[in-house]
Amino acid sequence: RGAARRALGELAIEAGDLTAARRYFVPGQSGPADLDARRRFARALAKQGQHAQAAQEYVESAQQLGGDPRVRVPLLRDA
């Protein structure tokens, strides 16, 4: 199920529908629980050449999840 959602999300990125892609990668989650999903979304954006959008996703994730170094380190490592 997760792999299928990610594949659909990647297709949505290719089609330029980033709103739909976000829904596939980050389905209705919020807060710290969605960090992995948001990181996967940002990596998929970067993989498709959407570097500005990927960077924005990392920034928004860092802002939403606060200043906890346990959260920021994985984001900085990916970015």
Image (spheres, rainbow, N blue to C red):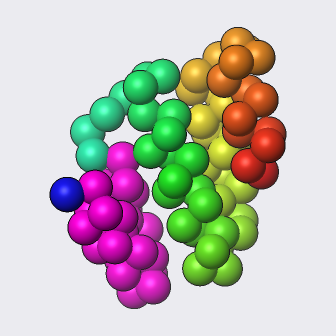
Residue 28, position as x, y percentages in the image? 26, 39
Tell me, yes or no, whether the highlighted magenta stretch contains residue 7.
yes
Residue 60, position as x, y percentages in the image? 61, 39
Q: Is residue 46 visible?
A: yes
> Please, what is the dominant secondary structure of the magenta stretch?
helix
At 57% from the left edge and 26% from the top edge, which residue is drawn? 64
Q: Quadrant of residue 43?
A: bottom right
Q: Quadrant of residue 9?
A: bottom left
In the figure, 42 relative to 44: above or below?
A: above
Tell whether 74 sits left or right of 4.
right
At 73% from the left edge and 27% from the top edge, which residue is drawn? 72
- Looking at the rendering, in which quadrant would you find the N terminus? bottom left
Number of numbered discs = 0
At 70% from the left edge and 13% from the top edge, which residue is drawn? 68
In the figure, 75 relative to 50: above or below?
A: above
At 77% from the left edge and 51% from the top edge, which residue is drawn? 79
Region of the chain picked out in magenta, as a range: 2-26
In the figure, 52 relative to 47: above or below?
A: above
Q: Is residue 53 visible?
A: no
Tell me, yes or no, whether the highlighted magenta stretch contains residue 43.
no
Residue 15, position as x, y percentages in the image? 39, 86
